[in-house]
Structures are given as structure tokens and as C-alpha cells.
Amino acid sequence: MHQKGDLYYPNEDFKKIALINNREIYQEAEKDPVKFWEKLAESLSWQKKWEKTFEHNPPYVKWFVGGKINITENIFEKNPQGWEKIKDKNAIIWQPELVDEEQKIFTYKDLFEKVNKFANALKKLGVKKGDRVGIYLPMIPEVIISMLACARIGAVHTVVFSAFSPHALQVRLQDTEAKILITTDGYYRRGGVVGLKQNADEAVDNTSVEKVIVVKRAGNPVNWDEGRDLWFEEISSQESGECPAEEMDSEDLFFILYTSGSTGKPKGIMHTCGGYIVQAKFTGQWIFDLKDDDILWCTSDVGWITGHTYTIYSPLLNTVPTLIFEGAPDWPNPDRWAQIIEDNKVTTFYTAPTAIRMFEKYGLEVIEKYKFESLQLLGSVGEPIDDSAWLWYFKNVGKERCPLVDTWWQTETGGILITSLPGVGPFKPAFSGLPFPGMNFEIFDEEGNICPQGKQGNLVLLPPFNPSLLRGVYKNPEKYLETYWKDYGEKVYFTSDAAYRDENGLIRIIGRVDDVIKMAGHRLSTGELEAAVNLHPDITECAAIGIPDEIRGEVPIVFVIYKGKKGEDEVKKEVVDYIKKEIGPIALPKEVYLVDDLPKTRSGKIMRRILRKLFTGEDLGDLSTLANSEIVSKLKNKVAGNNEK
Ligand code: WTA
């Protein structure tokens, strides 16, 4: 890459071989975005061609209306590149956590057979098109096999992150009314075995789950319910390796993925087949410049949207091997991640700023011996990347050679929507860059006027949006309307992010303007945390906020009003336990404060903004609107006292 002012551009040698290396594509897409997507869609294998490319019935959208397509045919036997040509290529490279355990590699042919066998097993259990299947698995090959098997027969998968608690899993299973849950005995994390089956056993009570399918991974002892539990391997191995692909309408439900919003209850984001497939394939291909000899390592767990789209579906649709890693990137040594890149000759590395900041903190000595010669492209996702992390990653991992794409998107958008293309640029530290071709983004002020360049406002997406935009919130149309289409009317999708544009049109994302906390790139809501803490019988009120954190971007802080008789330390522990039980260990707060009161308006609304400012050092502003302004100085002392400790 070379630098001009504060911008970076790809070098000529990268440009020469890049799939997209000039701006013509932007002009073409802008002229007619619907036609642009239509042209891309034409190169996929459709069971039946669509009749209408885009249909807008605000606030609902449809793409490729009337078309029929199954993603597994596009990955496997009807892959547009030709099955004979691709079947012996590597599809999955699985890296177990244990250093001395061997990798497992699956070619496209191996994977296809496993998918078909398991799809047949699901069918035998009565799973039909449209049925929901819960998947509660860590990063092992069976998670991919399970998702693809669902896709093969048209079942709707709902993957629940393996670090979520039994209760969080239960809530999702209840909402989807899944009849099947796929899990594992246990998996390795930081050298220990995490027993997942016991969580699953707890979660399936009071749900419609009839069968629990268990992958044997860690070999740890598990309880067994004879009438309900089945071993994954046993039921798969008896089946045939052929299974016809279900005919899927473009707008048939493909998967549901739960995510946090402003309230305590997670939302089931719905994605459908046609639009998602087109978006997953081409955003991955162009943004990561995916070619025949690439190896992609996207470090996101499949429990998140990044794992769905760029660990699994996009690389497989582009016939590129995807590396999946069971463990933590710094275990057993801080350079484990670097070792994996070198050993596997990874060409494309896609991770989150939290991981980058953690690598940075370990110090350069840790990666001194790595040249990272295989790497051609770096990506960042999930939270804003600051200048210093961007430059560290660019210099020390990408060796100033690799383009660094900072990709902005959401569970709701299904695929990346803002990032400069690697063969075009420009790139600027801390900026996500240009909207993907055909994307109509604006930055609005509160009234819906376009903000001038440099002024911060709300990031919105205008018609025709993008093919993989969410189609709704499962069983909750009001929530869909209220969350995304209320602020500026039913024709403007509000992202809930603040952003601004620089003089080159590059977009910088500031962060969420709603009550979502982005801890280590994971999405948590203050409402969810508060709902968990409020279950404590002696806590009468609480407030959760996210505060800036050097490594994890943001971390939660909880304030509670406690009316019981226990000591402070005990109450704090109980609060943490409630969060652990309701959400999982990923949501643990950095600190819990026991307080006498919370700052409130006269109408009784808790002013979380003021609580947050106690940590950021910002001016507290006018407190006269508070009903109890005297509490603020008390809280200030409490927070300051704690910081001194
Ligand atoms: C944030 C993750 C800054 C943003 C793919 C968004 C980002 C939320 C970036 C969605 C980025 C995602 N720079 N912020 N490159 N990418 N975000 O649903 O606040 O887990 O609204 O999807 O993450 O989080 P989600």
C-alpha cells in the first residue's frame, strides 16, 4: 500500500490482480442498483429464475421474487464453477485447540457427503422444510455440517453462541419452538473441557425440543436421556450420502439469529434465501478479493452473524477453504494466532479490534519471528477500530503490504455494507471507507436533514437497501417496525449507529446511539443486563451502562439499589451470578456499584447518560432537570473512590 496524505491506496501489483480495481463498478451500481444486484445474481445456480428483482412494500422488502434457490447446490453439485473442478478442493480446515491434536481437513466432496448424511438423519427424525432447528455448538466441523444440512432440506437454523447460558438458550428455543437441538458433549477452551451437554439438558426443559443430537467431541461424561438423546455420528453414519436439495423460494426463511436491541428480550432476526446468498457471495468475493488459491481465516464464532456469513457461507460459496479454530487466539501462548496463520498459509485474516488490541498489548516480541508472508489482505469488524490499533495491525501483521478493510455491517444487514474495496481504496485509519457499490447511505440529523460533511449524525440506509437486509423480527412485527422504521418513516432504515463523512466521502462509525453495548465486538443490551439483575429479590432498581475499555472497546458497569441485609461483596457476587445464569459468562460486568439512588428525571426516567459520563470524564452538563441532582456528586465520589483502589 502507498500513502498520499492521510489516505492509503493499494499498490500496482495488488491492483493488477484484484478482482475489482477501478471505480467503474461504483458508477454502474449507482445508476441502477437493482440491475447491479440482478446481474450478480444471474451468475448463481437458480432452481427457477426470479420474476421481479426488487419489491418494496414499506417497511418490507423482497428480492428476486418468485426465484428458487438452494445455497447448498451453489456450494456443491451445482457450483457455478463446476462440481468436477472443485470437489477435491479443501472446504474446511479445522484447527483444534489442543496443540498436539491433529487438524481435520474436509474437501468439498467430503463435506457434501457429511451434509447429505446428516440431512437424511434430520429428515428421518421428522424435520421438514420450515421447521426450526437449534444449534448450540462450538467451533467444530459439525457446526458447519449441521447448518448446511438444515439448508439442504429447508429447515431454519438458529445458532446459539456456545458461551450463552442455559437460560439464554432456553429463551431462544422457546421463541423458535425448535423440535431439535444439536449440541456436543464438551469442547476445549484454554486447556479445560467445557461441558455443553449439561447446559443443553437444563435449557430444553419447558421447550418443544423432542430430540437432542449430541456430537462426541471431548469425551467427557454426560447424562443421557434414552428417549430423547442421540449421537450425531451414529445417526449420520447409517444414512445415504445423497439427499436431494429442497426447492427454496427466494423469500423462504433461511435462518434466524438472535441479537440484542434496546430491550431485555433478544430479537430473532430473519434472513431469507435469495438475497442473502447473493449478498454473501459477492461481498465476500470483492471485499476479501477471494480467488482460487486463498485461505480465509475469519475468527468470528459461528454464534454471531460474522461467523454465519464470513466464516461459513461466503467462503464456501466462493469455493475458498475456511479455517475454523476451536480455541482462544492466545492459548496456550500469546502467539497462537500468528502460528496458525503461518502454519496454514492463511492469505486473508479477518478479526475484531478487540483481538487486535489484545495482540498489541502482548508486545511486538511475541510476533517478532513471524513474517506473515502468506497474508495478502486483512479485515476488521464488529466495533470501531481506533487509529492506533489500525496502524499496529497494518504495520506489524500486514507489513504495510496488505490492504486493510474495516468492514461495517450488522446482524440485520446480513453482509458487509461499508468498506473501501481492496483493489480501489482509499483507506484511512479509523474509517470504514466507502459504501459498497449500490448502497445508498446518508447521515441524517434528528429531523432527517442530510448532515454536512464532517458533522456527526445518524447513519441510515435508503432504498433499494441491500438484498440481505433483515426481513423481519421473528414473531414480532411491531418490534421490527419500531426498531428500524420509526425514526425517519417506513422508507428509511435506521442503523442505530452514529457516523460522519470526511471530505473524501469516507465514513467513520462512531458507535451505537441506542442501548447496545459492544463488548469485544459482541452485542449486549443494557436492557438485557438490567432484566437479569432485576430478578434479584432484594434489588429494587438497577441501571447498566457501557463504558470505554482499552482492550474490549466497551464493558458493562451495573449500578444497583439493594434493600437487603447482606454485605457488599456478597451482593456483588450475586449480581454477577444472575447475569451469568441469565445471559452467560460473556456478559459479566467490570464493576457492580451498590448505591442509594440513581439519577432520575422528574418523570422517573433513569439518566444513564449521566452515569456514563462519570467514567468518561465528560462534563456532566445541566443537572437541573433531575429530580434528585444531589445524588450525582455522591455517585461521582463512589466511582472515583473505586478507581483509586
Ligand atoms: C458495530 C457485527 C465500527 C456497529 C457485524 C453495528 C462496527 C454493530 C463495525 C452491529 C465497524 C460493526 N466499525 N462499528 N467496522 N462493524 N460495528 O449485529 O455499532 O454484532 O451497529 O454485527 O456493530 O453488530 P452485530
Image (cartoon, rainbow, N blue to C red):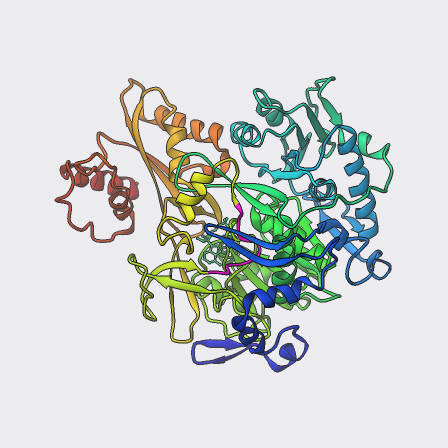
- Residue at x 27%, y 46% (from the top left corner): 609
Mark yes or no: residue 620 visible.
yes
295 relative to 506 in the view: left or right: right
Total labels: the figure holds 0
- Is 467 magenta? The answer is yes
Q: Which residue is depicted at the point 59% across and 55% down?
A: 63
228 relative to 448, above or below: above
Residue at image coords 67%, 32%: 183
In the picture, residue 37 is in which quadrant? bottom right
Residue 367 to residue 521: above or below:
below
Position above or below: 325 against 421: above
Which residue occupies the extreme front position in the image?
51
Magenta highlight: main SS: loop
Percent x, y of residue 394: 53, 68
Q: Horizontal and vertical percent for residue 189?
A: 62, 39
The image quadrant that residue 321 belongs to is bottom right
Q: Is residue 24 magenta?
A: no
Q: Is residue 468 above or below residue 565?
A: below
Q: Would residue 333 be seen by someone viewing this image from the given angle?
A: no
The residue lying toward the viewer, choosing from 416 and 508, is: 416
Q: Is residue 128 left or right of residue 336?
A: right
Magenta residues?
463-471
Percent position (x, y) of residue 69? 71, 51
Identify the image quadrant of the C terminus. Answer: top left
Residue 331 position in % (x across, y down): 61, 46
Image quarter where the N terminus lies is bottom right
